[in-house]
Image (tube, rainbow, N blue to C red):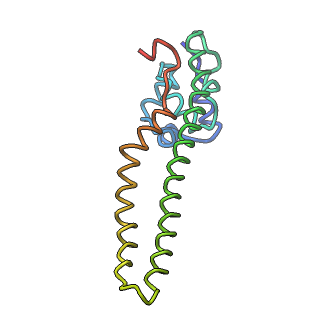
Amino acid sequence: MNEARIKDLRTARGWSQERLADESGVAVRTIQRLEAGNDASLETLSMVAKALDVPVRDLFVTVESDRLGIAVDGLDTRIADQRRARAKAQAAQRGWRYLYVGLGIAITAAVIIAVSSPDSSGEGILLVPAYWIGGLFVLRFLEKSVLGPRLDARFPLTAASTPEEAS
């Protein structure tokens, strides 16, 4: 069993078990079990470590199992990799939205110029709301059905760290 420092870290902040449970998003009973030295999943430990603003390794005085030690060390790097992947995916989605808005502004300006000419009947102004409303629906559809899956494939938010986890 690994000796946990969760209680020490929690009391150093002046937090109750309830507060730590609220901040980390786990049940109070889970915090009690962790402080008693019971084992928990790496995801749970990650959530508690994030709430306490420490790396997962700092939750323990010692880590007995080599396999657990490797997993704990790798968890922090996997979390950082996931955050970078999520940021890249969000940046790509923002880029497509900026393209949509930029093109919409150009279309709106072109339609206003065309409608203001004396030869225009003014019906071209209907293109502006058609673009903004229809384009929004098309953009949402493409984000969900095309762009989202491609971004998930290119920047996966989770990845297997060992061959056993991949199968």
Give whichever of 57, 123 is nearer the camera: 123
6 or 143, nearer to the observer: 143
Out of 52 and 109, give the one closest to the viewer.
109
The single residue placed furthest to the bottom in the displayed view is 118
Q: How many labels were placed on the picture?
A: 0
Tell me the quadrant of the picture where the N terminus can be found: top right
Task: Classify the position of the C terminus by image quarter.
Answer: top left
Residue 69 position in % (x across, y down) = 60, 15
Q: Is residue 82 above or below residue 125?
A: above
Residue at the spot 47% in from the left edge and 23% down from the top edge = 41
Q: Which residue is at a point 44% across and 17% down the rendered structure image?
A: 166
Q: Position of residue 21 (x, y in %)?
A: 48, 38
Quadrant assignment, res 118 = bottom left
The residue positioned farthest toward the front in the image shown: 119
Q: Residue at x 65, y 26 (%)?
A: 58
In percent of the image, x 38 and y 61: which residue is there? 135
* Observer-nearest of 10 and 114: 114
Query: Is 61 on the left-hand or right-hand side of 136?
Result: right
Quarter of the figure with residue 87: top right
